[in-house]
Amino acid sequence: MNYLDNCATTKPDPDVLNTFNTVNTTYFYNPSSPHGKGLEANKLLESARDQIKKLLGLKHQSVIFTSGATESNNLVITGMARSKKQFGKTIITSKLEHPSVLETVRALEDEGFNIKYVKFNEDATIDLNHFKSLLNQDVVMVCLMHVNNVMGAIIPIKDIHDLIQDYPKIHFHVDCVQSFGKLPIDASLMDSFVLSGHKFNGLKGQGILVFDQLVTVTHTLFGGGQEYGFRSGTVNVASDVSMAKAMRIALNEQEVIIERMRQFKRMIETKVEQYPGIRVNSVGNGAPHIVNIAFIGVKGEVIVNSFSKRGIMISTTSACSSKRAKLNETLTALNVPDDTITGSVRISFDKYTTETDIESFVKAFDEIYEEMKELLTQ
Ligand code: PMP
């Protein structure tokens, strides 16, 4: 089997699993318990938090452990918007965001917020002039993703950070799920950002929210007051400690892995772009681990199945939206023609991807192209 769907999830690193098991066996205690073992568990938790702060180079920001990026995005966007309501009601985001951002801002619209969507150019770069034109004194939040999970396009965090400096009310929130371990992240440029463990060889159900103005945010989850009162619920020490481990491993290895993934991306893109009826949607200077190509005129599901039958796991656009009937929102927002959107598939890598995986993909591509070529719109 060749697994090439690492944007959907990655295989857990055995060291991360070991840490999870060890902590769950030895420190299964509740870190809020006042007895000696509870205190020990709490100490372990806090040392994982400190380690994460060091790894991310955080100075004044807090780290909150959550169940993943969906929860982190919901908590921070809703909480921050509500706490800023008296200062302004406009939120800037884009149609390319993950549903955990898009659906959250849509819900905020029902509470009276104005949602403005910044335009993107056809090559998936953000239209910074349009972004500038959306800025005014009513804007309280900007929510954007660092790396797009469908196309791999990267947004220039520094440019956006610089553009909002004249608007001190704006909270700049970034979804860094697809960039951590694949690109450098400069935490000082963002007011908050989220990571998800299972995207960098950690485990599902583990994530963090990094936050600069914790004291000012409205709480949306009520209970025992864990995680500074912001994320109530018994803290999962084993998950959080093993996530810190996954982060350390990912950052230690990232230089070598990025270069290898970049080569794989180039190999696939330069191979398939020569074929009539195939379009490379992903951009050459995008994130190193994402390739997006369209078999124009053929359904993406058919292509995914054909690869799957040959033992190669790829995806139609993104796992979060692939079960929805409508056309992929990211590609629609980029004005990609409908027959190209329906035929689009995503191939994504991680540290376990090998040259053999890529060779198998290329071989299968040739066979599938042969089978489908009469159906392709050229
Ligand atoms: N944001 C992005 C960009 C993602 O790719 C994903 C996962 N598909 C999420 C958020 C949600 O992450 P989680 O699975 O941790 O809830």
Image: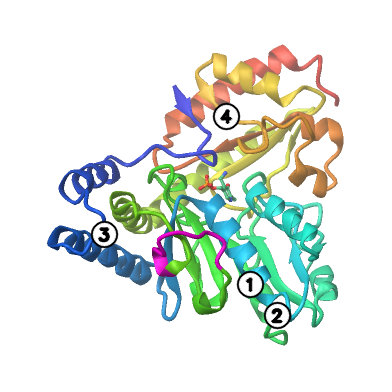
Residue, disc 2: 164
Q: Disc 2, disc 3: CB below 8 Å?
A: no
**Label 4 CA crowd tier, 10 Å (few <14, some 14–19, many 20+):** many
Residue type pointed to by label 4: Ile
Magenta-colored stretch includes residue 376: no
Residue, disc 3: 31
Nearer-the-camera pick, 160 or 272: 160
Does the image show residue 178? Answer: no
The residue segment tinted magenta is: 219-228
Residue, disc 4: 314
Residue type pointed to by label 1: Phe
**SS under mark 1:** strand
The label shown at residue 193 is none
In the drawing, does residue 140 fall left or right of residue 73?
right
How is the structure coloured here?
rainbow
**Label 2 CA crowd tier, 10 Å (few <14, some 14–19, many 20+):** some
Q: Earlier in the sequence, mark 3 or mark 4?
A: 3
Residue type pointed to by label 2: Ile
Q: Residue furthest front?
A: 223
Seen at 67% across and 69% down, the residue is: 81
The x, y position of residue 280, in whole percent, is 71, 39
Residue, disc 1: 172
- Distance from disc 3 to disc 4, alpha carbons, whole Å, reads 40 Å
The x, y position of residue 251, in whole percent, is 37, 59
Q: Is mark 1 within 8 Å of ligand 1?
A: no
- Distance from disc 3 to disc 1, alpha carbons, whole Å, reads 32 Å
Q: Earlier in the sequence, mark 4 or mark 1?
A: 1
Seen at 34% across and 54% down, the residue is: 240
**SS under mark 4:** loop
The x, y position of residue 22, in whole percent, is 19, 45
- Distance from disc 2 to disc 1, alpha carbons, whole Å, reads 8 Å
